[in-house]
Image: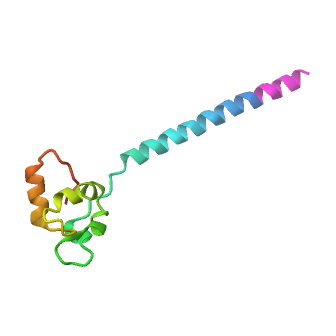
Amino acid sequence: MKNSNTLLMSCVLASLFTASAFAQDTKEAAAVAEAQPAPAALSWAEMDKDSNGSLSKDEATANKSLAEIFDQADGDANGQLSGDEYRSYLAANPSVQTSKK
C-alpha cells in the first residue's frame, strides 16, 4: 500500500511539473514572437506592381492602412492613387498614420 501511495504521489508531482514546463515554453514562445521585428512596410515602388507610378486599389491592399484611406486619398476618383495625391492627402490629414517607406 505504501508503494502505491508513493507511486501515486510521484505521478501527481510529475504531471504538475510537466504542466508547468509546458506553460513556461508557451510563455517563452510568446515572448520570442513579440520580440521579432514587424515586417518592413513595402515601398511605393514595391506595391506598384505594374510600374506605372500610381497605385490601383488592388495594389494598395498590400498596405492595410493605405487601403483603408485609398478612396479618400484618390483625389480625382480615377481608381489610381498618384504620389502627389497621396502626399496632398497626408498634408491635409496630418493625424492619419500610414506605414510608408
Q: Is residue 51 left or right of residue 85?
A: right
Q: Nearer the viewer, residue 77 or 63?
A: 77
Q: Is residue 67 left or right of residue 15?
A: left
Seen at 10% across and 59% down, the residue is 87
Residue 86: percent from the left, percent from the top? 14, 61
Q: Was residue 32 drawn as part of the magenta stretch in this picture? A: no
Q: Looking at the magenta stretch, what is its main secondary structure?
A: helix
In the picture as drawn, the residue positioned furthest to the top comes out as 2
Residue at x 18%, y 48% (from the top left corner): 96
Where is the C terminus found, in terms of image quarters? bottom left
In the image, 5 versus 57, the foreground residue is: 57
* Residue 25: percent from left, percent from top: 54, 41
- Quarter of the image with the N terminus is top right
Work out whether 26 lies above or below 64. Answer: above
Q: Taking 79 as reference, is 27 above or below it?
A: above
Colour scheme: rainbow
Q: Is residue 85 left or right of residue 18?
A: left
Number of dots carrying numbers: 0
Magenta span:
1-10
